[in-house]
Image (cartoon, coloured by chain):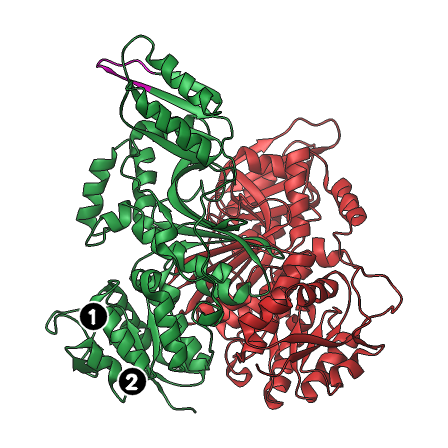
Chain colours: A green, B red
Amino acid sequence: MSDPLRLGIAGLGTVGTGVVKIVRRHADLLTARTGRPITISAVSARSRDKDRGVPLKDYAWEDNAVELAQRDDVDVFVELMGGEDGPAKAATEAAIAAGKQVVTANKAMLAIHGQNLAEAAEASGTQIRYEAAVAGGIPVIKALTEGLAGNEITRVMGVMNGTCNYILTKMEATGQGYNALFEECAKLGYLEADPNLDVGGIDAAHKLAILSSIAFGTQVNFDGIEIEGIQRITLSDIRHAADMGFRIKLLGVAQMTGRGLEQRMTPCLVPYDSPLGQLEGGTNMVVIEGDSVEQIVLRGPGAGEGPTASAVMADICDIARGTRLPVFGTPSNTLTKAPAARSASAAPYYLRMDLHDKPGAMAKVAAALGEAGVSIDRMRQYGHDNEAAPVLFVTHKTTHASLAAALEAIGKTSVVLGEPVALRIEHL
Amino acid sequence: MSDPLRLGIAGLGTVGTGVVKIVRRHADLLTARTGRPITISAVSARSRDKDRGVPLKDYAWEDNAVELAQRDDVDVFVELMGGEDGPAKAATEAAIAAGKQVVTANKAMLAIHGQNLAEAAEASGTQIRYEAAVAGGIPVIKALTEGLAGNEITRVMGVMNGTCNYILTKMEATGQGYNALFEECAKLGYLEADPNLDVGGIDAAHKLAILSSIAFGTQVNFDGIEIEGIQRITLSDIRHAADMGFRIKLLGVAQMTGRGLEQRMTPCLVPYDSPLGQLEGGTNMVVIEGDSVEQIVLRGPGAGEGPTASAVMADICDIARGTRLPVFGTPSNTLTKAPAARSASAAPYYLRMDLHDKPGAMAKVAAALGEAGVSIDRMRQYGHDNEAAPVLFVTHKTTHASLAAALEAIGKTSVVLGEPVALRIEHL
């Protein structure tokens, strides 16, 4: 029997508590699988007195996560505090400097500081593992970094924020509006402290930035992601999409192009009967395409105590078994800086706008679309009882550049109220 | 730069050729990812002269796979010959005895001889990796052994034979019968040399036996699997199932029960709109359920040059990176011998049989069902123009034991022509 692998866990929220429970419940199973006992030396959290439903008295307590990370009796620093900076980053850096291995669920920290942290970890001869940072219980980091290591990855896509998918699915199922469901999510505790992280697409984009880096051997580039949230999606958008055989999903897409790395996290229309279209509620799905493997689809719970703790434990078991991997799949000094590129591939778009109810308004919009080279596949104008006339277009395939030119020209006509909604239609 | 990892590849069919291509095409990428060059020292196959569309002259040739496995310039023996015994097993044993690491796609060999091979590998201080043996390009062995290592696995299910799924899907889509599609598969080269391996469910059962061992920490027990092929499924079965909102899939299920390990690979009815019901053509799907992760669904191509070679390369990359794992996830001396158990959980069943067109026939069948405690949810009798009257029952939930008793009693009534078809209805 080898020496135990000793954990120091910082953060005892849902996930941290879940990890403590698994270590206690499955001690024998984990030892059988990894060849050594997995033990907890110390824990750290904001409040020592809170009852977390799990006994903590066997473990040393640290008020300060940095001190936890540096303890001699800690082999692996398990960072489950969250937040891209602050204590999480300070403690992770301290752990790395002390040569500890790091397991984290912190997508924000990795999406923003991943390159620096990877360089520091390599310099210190250690590693950072983060299966729980992307898509909850789905072992997608492992699938991409190891399971598909023989592939040149051509595209990564996914629905990776369960809260957004819950809201969009439930709008369709119940006919409730966005605002009502946002309130429901707030009450259910489904939202991050800053809800814009969820509904604004930031959280999902953090995850996409991490997957891109592994997939394409590039330095994480969160700032290069085109991000749009779901806040402007209305019930009528969802119903129009359904009428045409589509569902609206907050979809992440990353692919390498001749001009640079395309990364976007935006609401899109996807076919109702595609795997992504069928995804309901808080479930996540990641689609990975490679030159040999063709296409792999991974589906599972994107959040929650059990699934996320399962992912953390996978990293801990790997470390216990002696597995060592570069942080983003290749050494950090080989990761390239790819320029951000907008999608050049043409796609049909769904456009919704409110026109001033005046003669000639529609003609001006149609002319602006035509002049930008955007041709109309379908159009509908709806009955209305106020001055705003809702109009819906589905375009033929067009490039992002043509569409942007058309929208700019439409804006200058002064016949449109507010901002048009433009959603890409993805035929997956 | 570390020393190269040197491969000896035995078997240059579709998969072997695919591996050679990836090693050549992605030399730099593989080196970046694993930290060392991956090279091929020698190859072996039945015919040296065949043009395989890939240059082999840089590699030493061995007529005998055993000699290939023992070469001093081979670190990893890559077994892609197939067959549960014969040269594949002899060469694998020789490689293990010589302390080589082994990568194989050979599900039959592992399902039958896995325990002995694992014991030999451990005694020799080496490992056997076999991602390509189950579900083609889907990294399911890695997901189960590593990605879900923190879970007690509760159930594994899957559609794992692409040929069967192709036939069943195409019967529904085209209205062609089983025999016509079997002939088509034979012409397309979709069938194993012994087609009963595919359509008889044996190949899929080999894969299930491997997954069970990892999932439940048991010695592979292929003989304990209840196996039924798809040969008796008719077009009318498929249409009846569709009428009720189901599709017929060759479904594998493994779960630990209080009485032992339940393993079955049988045609079942699954809901049309479930992930398994939506699976078309040669695609595979594996569903894994664990106490923490809840449910993970993995989907991808189950066969073919690229996907299967991708899986072989994943194992090779792991070895190059220094990853070491017990063959079935825990040391072979900890794997238990679980008795085979039939499913005790009740389920509705689909029953189809041909009755002699005589007065009282239906009454006898209905009585036999009732006496065995099997109650009828729905029944249909069809118009017919010969002496066999086709009759369809859907039962309420019943146990396998009750159903077996009913079928035995029905057999004794002498009013049934041939063997009834009984398919479990799985509400997933």
List the single residue furthest toward the left: A49
Residue, far top: A359
* Percent x, y of residue B232: 70, 46
Confirm whether the magenta stretch covers residue A385: yes
Nearer the N terminus, badge 1 or badge 2? 2
Q: Which residues are magenta?
A: A382-390
Residues B389 and A197: in front is A197
Are discs 1 and 2 both within one chain?
Answer: yes
> Is residue A209 rendered magenta in the image?
no
Q: Secondary structure at mark 1?
A: helix
Q: Name the chain under label 1.
A: A
x, y (%) of residue A242?
41, 29
* Overall secondary structure of the magenta section: loop
Residue shown at 23% from the left, 73% from the top: A90
Q: Does B147 sit above or below residue A427?
A: below
Within 10 Å of disc 1 (Cα), the crowding (few <14, some 14-19, many 20+) is some
Residue A244 x/y as whole percent: 45, 27
Closer-to-camera residue (A246/B354) = A246
| Mark 2 lies on residue | A74
